[in-house]
Amino acid sequence: MKLQLQKLMAGENLSIEEMKEAAEFLFTGEASDSEAGALLGLLALKGETADEIAGLVQAIREKSVPIKSVRGSVMDNCGTGGDGSKSFNISTASAFVIAGAGIKIAKHGNRSVSSQTGSADVLEQLGVSLECTPEQTEELLEENNIAFLFAPYVHPGMKQVMKVRKDLRVPTIFNLIGPLTNPIELDTQLMGIYRRDKLQLMGSVLQRLGRKRAVVVNGAGHMDELSLAGENHLVILDEGGLHSVTLTPEEAGLPTYSLEEIAGGDAERNARIMMSILNGDNGPFRDTVLLNAGVGIFANGKADTIQEGIQYAKESIDSGAALSKLEFLIKKSNRLERGVV
């Protein structure tokens, strides 16, 4: 890691291979806390490049629990978190709507870090077992179009850097990469990010990681989700190129709501909100999920426009398909945990 630290101290960028090498040294546990802290601090001070982020992600994915035997196209709609909005679990609810629209989605997530309730917290509250083996995850994706990948289970090597991250007490490159580290080979992706100035950068990272299509979003109010509170900013990756667009509630054909109207709470409250959405209740929670699921369906390529994606999302909820995906996941994940076929 000496070479990498010297380059960073001189204000120079690392190549993908140099970043991978430094990351692999971190994950062996041989790096001292000082070396790890210097690497993360210097990267943040200089500003992380697409090559550096991609190199770290590749190193993490190579160390993750392998989930390889998934047939067909798979996407994720995980966000970075960190926006401080205290919203309900938008991307988690949207994942079931996307799955109900016929798209295979590997939902990557964790317990609460910066938010009140993480995706793992709300799913556990609903009765989903988080303890699935790679083979069971593959089975769920094949049978149900959706499985949950609990980050600590699929990334056991990440514990090597947790202490340093906590000691630094400032955002680092690791605050940007969670949605990129899904161990499954993804074809398409909807990624929310809490920093609007990183939209183009993350689009470039997704290019390097080989996504066929993707949308990176920062919502109104600087959320890491799309919001109906105003103008959303999107970077779209398609056919190898990146372009930026904005999206308002009016353009999406949906009402405007304040951020306060989509506030969540603890896992119990957010579970109730999710069930109300999937059971067809109207209002700001449903419409926010329609927007996010609709953009996810568009990111996947099933819909040619965002408005068409929103229509698919409505059909997924109103037909009961989205709810059935959650109910199946609850029952099947618990049967698998108990060893029942």
Image (cartoon, grey):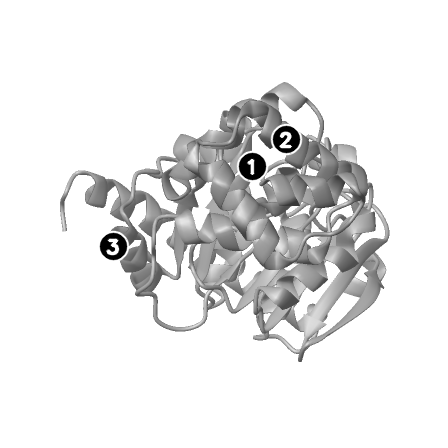
Q: Quadrant of the N terminus?
A: top right
Question: Residue 39 appears at what percent x and percent y?
Answer: 65, 36
- 156 sits left or right of 216 in the view: left
Residue toward you, 47 or 13 = 13
Alpha carbons under labels 1 and 2: distance apart: 8 Å
The label shown at residue 273 is: 1
Callout 1, which amino acid? Ile
Callout 2, which amino acid? Gly
Task: Write the residue at 82% across / 41% down.
Answer: 221
Question: Residue 201 appears at what percent x and percent y?
Answer: 75, 57
Tell me the element at label 2.
Answer: loop
Question: Residue 45 appears at what percent x and percent y?
Answer: 79, 37
Alpha carbons under labels 3 and 2: distance apart: 33 Å
- Front label number (3 vs 1): 3
- 207 sits left or right of 150 in the view: right
Callout 3, which amino acid? Glu
Asked if residue 243 is positioned above or below residue 154 in the image, the reply reads below
Residue pointed to by mark 2: 264
Task: Write the residue at 42% across / 53% down.
Answer: 62
Q: Quadrant of residue 167?
A: top right
Alpha carbons under labels 3 and 1: distance apart: 31 Å
Give the mark nearest the N terminus, 3 or 1: 3
Asked if residue 208 is positioned above or below residue 34 in the image, the reply reads below
- 312 sits left or right of 271 in the view: right
Asked if residue 270 is positioned above or below residue 321 in the image, the reply reads above
- Front label number (3 vs 2): 3
Give the mark nearest the N terminus, 3 or 2: 3
> Can I make out residue 123 in this image?
no
- Front label number (1 vs 2): 2
Residue pointed to by mark 3: 135
Tag 1–tag 2 contact (CB < 8 Å): yes
